[in-house]
Image: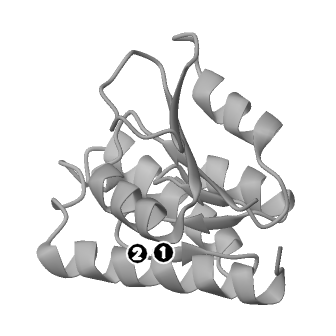
Amino acid sequence: MLHIYIDADACPVKPEVYRVAKRLKLEVTVVTNSWMRIPDDKNISLEVVGAGFDEADDWIVDHVENNDIVITADIPLASRCIKKAARVIGASGKPFTEDNIGQTLATRDLLSELRSAGEITGGPPPLSQRDRSRFLQTLNEVAQSIRRNNPV
């Protein structure tokens, strides 16, 4: 069954994932370093992992399978999941793919260096309503595509 994993600690689109998952009857696992409230739904589970570096990422990579969906803004995690043939979507609705993950990792590293040098301050802008709409559309399209190509 198609499964969605949420890298949840800093994920701003959890409510959107819950809405799509409920409509499409998909299982969701919310992976986090500390307890958080999730909807009371038999298809949504919470997995609290240790607080160590990358523990949530490692848990997701250990459990994700071919054609599962991972929701994350963590580019190294996205790369690891793509290697396991999972579909990965960022919070703004941008899909991470084999075609764009290398460039995305390189851009991330460059921006990290610029921040370290003090050339860039601050983080990304908050998600707009347009970003949330794009995310919903992308998640729905990816889930429907997987279902079409892998009927149960």
Disc 1 element: helix
Q: Which residue is mark 2?
A: 93
For the residue pair 67 and 121, the one nearer the viewer reads as 67
Position above or below: 24 against 137? above
- Placement of 52 over or under 92, stated as above or below: above
- The answer to whether residue 101 is seen in the rendering is yes
Q: Is residue 40 left or right of residue 58?
A: left
Q: Nearer the viewer, residue 46 or 63?
A: 46
Q: In this rendering, is residue 1 above or below 74?
A: below
Residue 35 rendering spot, x and y as whole percentages: 38, 16
- Residue 21 in the image: state x and y as whole percent: 47, 61
Q: Residues within 10 Å of mark 1 (few under 14, many from 20)?
A: many
Q: Position of residue 65 (x, y in %)?
A: 83, 53
Q: Kindly identify the residue that appears in the image at 78 percent across and 67 percent down.
A: 67
Q: Secondary structure at mark 2?
A: loop
Which quarter of the figure has residue 43? top right
What colour scheme has been applied to the protein in the rendered image?
A: one colour
Local packing at callout 2 (Cα closer than 10 Å; few below 14, some 14-19, many 20+) is: many
Measured from the top left, where is residue 15 in percent x and y?
28, 53
Which circle's residue, 2 or 1, is located before the other in the chain? 2
| Disc ID at residue 139 | 1
Q: CB atoms at circles 2 and 1 under 8 Å apart?
A: yes
